[in-house]
Amino acid sequence: MSAAGLHHELALPTGGTLSGLTLMLSHALGCDLRMWDALTAHLLSQGHRVLRYDQRGHGRSPAPPGPYTMAMLADDAAALIERLGVGPVVWVGLSMGGMVGQELALRHPQRVRAVVLANTTSGYPAEAQAGWAQRIEGIRQGGLEAIVDGALQRWFHEGFRAAQQGTVALWRERVLACDAAGYIACCEAISQVDTTRRLPAVAVPTLVIAGELDAGTPPAMARRIADAIPGAQLVVLPDASHLSVLEQPAAFAACLDAWLTTLPRD
């Protein structure tokens, strides 16, 4: 698929001191670039340029026939960076976006200057892979309606779901708006993620973010990534489940801000 087909938004800071950094934001499975609305506004206020996009099969991007691989999704991102001439970027990926970021740093190291890997994993045990196969079959039998409520339970902890019913309802609608075939193809890519043994080759500054309450990609998975990448920093956000940037936006932004100050500037 051509990078020209990926729906994206490139935003420039409106004033003040420019940081010289371009942050590229990559969303989770079942979401789209709007997952980053609040963080984008914050980053622009800090003087950063922000590129966010809809991954294939999501949002306003096309859904070419699957199955997909994580290498394909990383190549999509690399091609978009090259076409727009914005690299090397600081990659910020959550869940599926974090898996893409690992592969991007390994396959296209010249396209990234640093990576943030949030609520993600470098591989699943066999029982979790079987769970992905069950999810795919559930969608084939009953559409996205069959899996959406289970996804929301993993994304948001019980207290958040009770207090932020409007937000939960909004993201339920957005999952159901996904292309089912594209969603399945991305599930197939996710189920086969296996970067753990290659992670020591990641040679850029890395921040790993975990959610204390994340059942889908628990802190132990984040620790495995941080331990494998030389010099990686790990932050575990309290009272956060899987979509930590939505549940704990201020804490997510604060740890990102602090880490960005440590990056060398051109």
Image: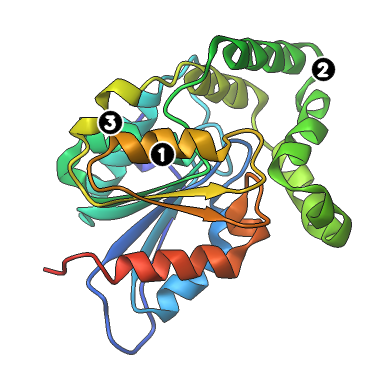
Assign a secondary structure to mark 1. Answer: helix
Q: Which residue is mark 2?
A: 142
Q: Looking at the image, do the residues carrying marks 2 and 1 touch, with CB atoms under 8 Å apart?
A: no
Assign a secondary structure to mark 2. Answer: helix
- The reply to whether residue 8 is visible in this rendering is no
Residue 186 position within the rendered picture, expressed as x and y whole percent measured from the top left: 53, 25
Q: Which residue is mark 3?
A: 199
Q: Is residue 185 above or below residue 237?
A: above
Assign a secondary structure to mark 3. Answer: helix
Nearer-N-terminus badge (3/2): 2
Residue 178 position within the rendered picture, expressed as x and y whole percent measured from the top left: 66, 35
Residue in the picture at 57% in, 47% down: 32
Q: Looking at the image, do the residues carrying marks 3 and 2 touch, with CB atoms under 8 Å apart?
A: no
Q: Is residue 236 toward the left or the right of residue 136 in the image?
A: left
Residue 59 position within the rendered picture, expressed as x and y whole percent measured from the top left: 58, 43
Residue 159 position within the rendered picture, expressed as x and y whole percent measured from the top left: 83, 55
Label 2 is placed on what type of residue? Gly
Nearer-N-terminus badge (1/3): 1
Label 3 is placed on what type of residue? Leu
Few, some or many residues within 10 Å of mark 1 (<14, 14–19, 20+) = some
- The reply to whether residue 109 is visible in this rendering is yes
Label 3, label 2: how many angstroms apart (C-alpha)?
A: 37 Å
Q: Which residue is mark 1?
A: 5
Label 1 is placed on what type of residue? Gly
Query: Which residue is the extreme one toward the left?
Result: 266
Instruction: Say which quadrant the C terminus sits in.
Output: bottom left
